[in-house]
Image (cartoon, rainbow, N blue to C red):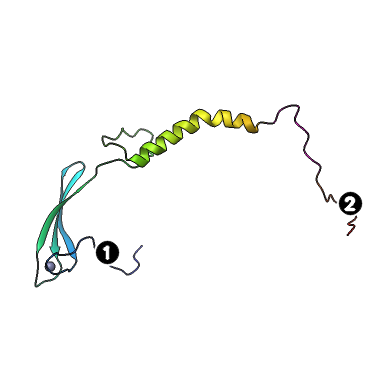
């Protein structure tokens, strides 16, 4: 959503104006080279840098997706461990709440219809 504010990624170190991405190319599946130019026409300094994908933060939702070549983020590892723990313990927790045959019958509802109200 555009809220009317201009998104600035970097600023020129010489004049402080916003840098605009002028060129970008992939040199590797996970590595992009970027060239930024200062938007101040009197300055026009340009800068080069890289954007790199270093980790996978969450898995693909596609069932046949290949496994990622990137290492998982710590949060991703924690979520996987929690999901594995839940998968192992979900049956044990369900037994705790499963009603047994000799359990007391449910309490009758109070304030049933037909009974007079005695304040
Ligand atoms: Zn500048």
Checking the image for residue 91, the label placed there is: none
Neighbour class for label 1 at 10 Å: few (<14), some, many (≥20)? few
- In the rendered image, the quadrant that contains the N terminus is bottom left
Is residue 63 one of those drawn in magenta?
no
Principal secondary structure, stretch drawn in magenta: loop
As drawn, the residue found furthest toward the bottom would be 42
Checking the image for residue 114, the label placed there is: 2
Image spot of residue 42 (x, y percent): 9, 73
Going from N to C along the chain, the mark reached first, 2 or 1, is 1
Report the residue at 28% width, 41% height from top. Answer: 55
Report the residue at 24% width, 63% height from top. Answer: 8
Please give left or right for residue 96 compared with residue 105 in the image.
left
Is there any visible trace of residue 60 in the rendered image?
A: no
Image spot of residue 103 (x, y percent): 75, 30
Checking the image for residue 7, the label placed there is: 1
Is the CB of mark 2 within 8 Å of ligand 1? no
Question: Could you tell me which secondary element the residue under label 2 belongs to?
Answer: loop
Is residue 101 one of those drawn in magenta?
yes
Q: State if disc 1 and disc 2 touch (CB < 8 Å).
A: no
Image spot of residue 85 (x, y percent): 47, 31
As drawn, the residue found furthest toward the top would be 101
- In the rendered image, the quadrant that contains the C terminus is bottom right
Please give left or right for residue 82 compared with residue 92 in the image.
left
Name the quadrant containing residue 47.
bottom left
Relative to 51, say whether 65 is above or below: above
Please give left or right for residue 47 compared with residue 91 in the image.
left
Which of 44 and 89 lies nearest the eye of the viewer? 89
Name the quadrant containing residue 105.
top right
Is there any visible trace of residue 87 in the rendered image?
A: yes
Question: Could you tell me which secondary element the residue under label 1 belongs to?
Answer: loop
Report the residue at 34% width, 65% height from top. Answer: 2
**Magenta residue span:** 99-108
């Amino acid at each position: 959503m555009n809220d009317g504010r201009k998104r600035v990624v970097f600023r020129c170190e010489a004049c402080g104006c916003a840098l605009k991405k002028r060129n970008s190319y992939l040199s590797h599946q996970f590595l992009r080279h970027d060239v930024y130019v200062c938007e101040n026409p009197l300055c026009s300094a340009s800068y080069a840098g890289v954007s790199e994908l270093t980790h996978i933060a969450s898995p693909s939702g596609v069932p046949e997706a290949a496994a990622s070549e990137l290492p998982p983020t710590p949060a991703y590892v924690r979520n996987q461990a929690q999901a594995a723990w839940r998968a192992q313990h979900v049956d044990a927790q369900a037994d705790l709440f499963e009603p047994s045959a000799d359990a007391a019958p449910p309490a009758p509802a109070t304030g049933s219809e037909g009974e007079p109200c005695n304040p």
